[in-house]
Amino acid sequence: MKTHRHEEDAATLEQFLDTKLEARRLFSELLGTFFLVLAGAGGAAVHYWKPDEVTTAMAVIAPGIMVMAAIYFMGAVGGAHLNPAVTFAFSLRRNFPWKRVPGYIAAQFVGGIFAVYFLRLIFGEIANHGGTVPSPELTPMAAFLLEAALTMGLVSTILGTASGARNIGTNGAIAVGGYIALAGMWSAPATGASMNPIRSLAPDILRGDFSTTWIYIAGPFLGALIGVAIEWALKGEPTAFGTEAAQGEPSGGRDQKKK
């Protein structure tokens, strides 16, 4: 028997797949990524400026809480990917059509660029310290592997709690936001705990330093690939829309809906 919640989820999924609403979804990705980079790069920059008032812990928790909020207020509109690696993972998992990937990544890029230049407008040169760079004590390869591992965990969390190709609902918001905050609390001193190519690329463009950018692009995409493989091993083939598999119902979900 269908519940009211299941009917709402089905209606949301139908709206999410409606190509006529693509502009709305792209705007939600732009806006959500703007807020994410604003919190991530802004937190790092203000920590550099006033380290006694904005501690390292505060700076790394902020993006996690921001993602949690974004999932709550816009997840049902565009999916709240906010990260090219997440969009890539959803598509690789067959939850999200590849033809929509370029638009989503472009919107995320624009949102990230707007955020860092907004920070420059507000804080001036201090905004240059909003980037993610590896600790001098780490080799580039070690930083790359750590970013890959962190993103693997993020993608595993997202695919395990999201509904199809969308980050929506209490489970997704708390799990994903909590994971980002937790990962940052222990690994930020090592790499900045980016797990997001746009989060790192946008500040690098602002400050004109691309010496470590490859770490934060290649690492998250490798981690996303491994995360999808883990989801496949845990839950098998996705369903037509990926909804049952993403919610932990790799079989039987469709039969339940028929009752």
Image: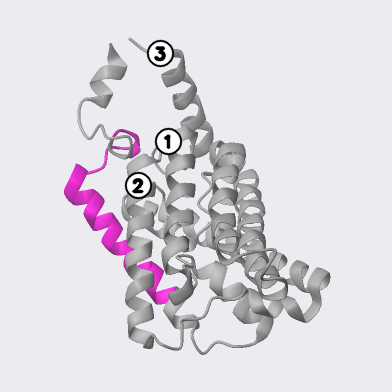
Q: Nearer the viewer, mark 1 or mark 2?
A: 1
Give the residue number, with chain letter if any, for mark 3. Answer: 3
Amino acid beneath label 3: Thr
Q: How far across and how far down the image is residue 92, in percent?
A: 33, 56
Report the residue at 27% width, 35% height from top. Answer: 248
Q: Disc 3 and disc 1: Cα gap in Å?
A: 18 Å
Viewer-side residue, 169 vs 139: 139
Can the viewer see residue 224? no
Report the residue at 66% width, 71% height from top. Answer: 51
Disc 1 element: helix
Amino acid beneath label 1: Asn
Q: In which quadrant of the rendered image does the C terminus lie? A: top left
Magenta part of the protein: which range? 217-244
First in sequence: mark 3 vs mark 2: 3
Q: How far across and how far down the image is residue 14, in percent?
A: 48, 31
Q: Is residue 164 left or right of residue 198?
A: left
Give the residue number, with chain letter if any, for mark 1. Answer: 171
First in sequence: mark 1 vs mark 2: 2
What kind of secondary structure does the magenta stretch mostly adopt? helix
Q: How far across and how far down the image is residue 7, in percent?
A: 45, 18
Does 228 lie within the magenta span? yes
Can the viewer see residue 188? yes
Category of crowding for the residue at label 2, using alpha-carbon neighbours closer than 10 angstroms: few (below 14), some (14–19), many (at least 20): many
What is the number of the mark on residue 159? 2
Amino acid beneath label 2: Leu
Category of crowding for the residue at label 1, using alpha-carbon neighbours closer than 10 angstroms: few (below 14), some (14–19), many (at least 20): some
Viewer-side residue, 229 vs 186: 186
Report the residue at 23% width, 57% height from top. Answer: 229
Position of 201 relative to 232 (above/below): below
